[in-house]
Image: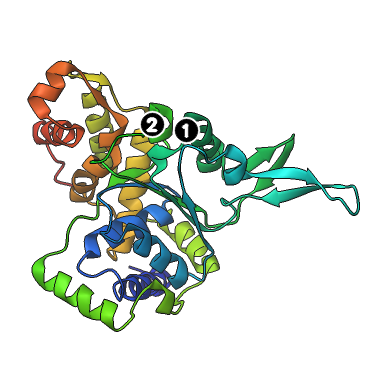
Amino acid sequence: MNKDMLNQNEKIKRLIENVEQVIVGKRETINLVVAAMLAGGHVLIEDVPGVGKTQLVSAIAKSCEGQFGRLQLTPDVMPSDITGYTMIDQTTHNTEFRKGAVFCNFLIADEINRASPKSQSALLEIMEEGQVSVDGNTYVLPKPFMVLATQNPVETYGTYHLPEAQMDRFIMKISVGYPNRQDELDIMMRNERNISAKTLHSVITCEDVVSLAEFVKEVSCSDAVRDYIVDIVEATRKEDYIKLPVSPRGSIALYKMAKAYAFVLGREYVLPDDVKFLAPFVLSHRIILTPKGKSLADTTEGAINAILAKIPVPVR
């Protein structure tokens, strides 16, 4: 790794170590979220309540000197609550735009599947274009901008299924998972000492994040690894147990994530193992299984893993 990239990678290490003061025993999850941030993507966190999803986002925002926003989504949340709205100033009688919750660097959309389809659709342009269009005017969101949405996979009463078009906007879907015994004891002690995202100090700036994202583009990826990515995506289109296969947006997402993840791990090149490790996180939420597929693979992650098992991993 050249000197410039090495210096940039030191910033990533400081960021991750800072977040680990709050998020205990989840280095892999932190690496994935940081990689998604550098790849310019958004993350869907599907997990039970209380495992640290909000703390993770808040810790990353605080570590980057970023503005942290939160939407607690319910059926009565309106699109204007998300995007903002135009109103008339009673004093000047001029129109004035009041910014919505999305005007921040890191937005957590808590329990996104509880919002109505109308409100969910308000996030489509935001996540794809990084801008908001209201009353014929376009407002650009600050950079970096990242949406981390959560949904509870257990309690589905009163929820609205996310449409495939919106699922496809997330660069990956992850879960935090429960901590092991020792980590949970550590979490209890840190909570007693009031160690939380609020107590963290920033270690890098938002400008650093934008700069790091540019360095990610310089990470090299061989033709063999690019072919491997396309082989995986094409395989989803050939299996009869997959009703909706991966689109080109999925192959682009896997390519971007592979480069960003390699950079987070301190490499300036992508390994085939990076692609194999990331594929279930990046592709599983982009496919729909047929009834036959559900009986064979049970989950979409299982279907992607079955495909990975069939495709030879390149050795160069």
Position of residue 180 relative to residue 282, above or below, is below
Q: Label for residue 194?
A: none
Q: Residue at x 25, y 35 (%)?
A: 284
- Lateral position of residue 96 relative to residue 178, left or right: right
The CA distance from mark 1 to mark 2 is 6 Å
1 or 2: tag closer to the N-terminus: 1
Q: Position of residue 245 (x, y in %)?
A: 28, 23
Residue sitting nearer the eye, 136 or 41: 136
On the image, numbered disc 1 is attached to which residue?
116
Amino acid on which the number 1 mark rests in the picture: Ser
Q: Residue at x 33, y 57 (%)?
A: 53
Q: Quadrant where the N terminus lies?
A: bottom left
Position of residue 194 relative to residue 160, above or below, is below
Position of residue 148 relative to residue 288, above or below, is below
Q: Position of residue 123 (x, y in %)?
A: 52, 39
On the image, numbered disc 2 is attached to which residue?
160
Q: Is residue 200 visible?
A: no
Q: Are marks 1 and 2 in contact (CB under 8 Å)?
A: yes
- Lateral position of residue 199 relative to residue 190, left or right: right
Q: Neighbour class for label 1 at 10 Å: few (<14), some, many (≥20)? A: many
Q: Residue at x 19, y 48 (%)?
A: 277
Residue sitting nearer the eye, 288 or 231: 288
Q: Residue at x 51, y 71 (%)?
A: 65
Q: Position of residue 308 (x, y in %)?
A: 14, 36
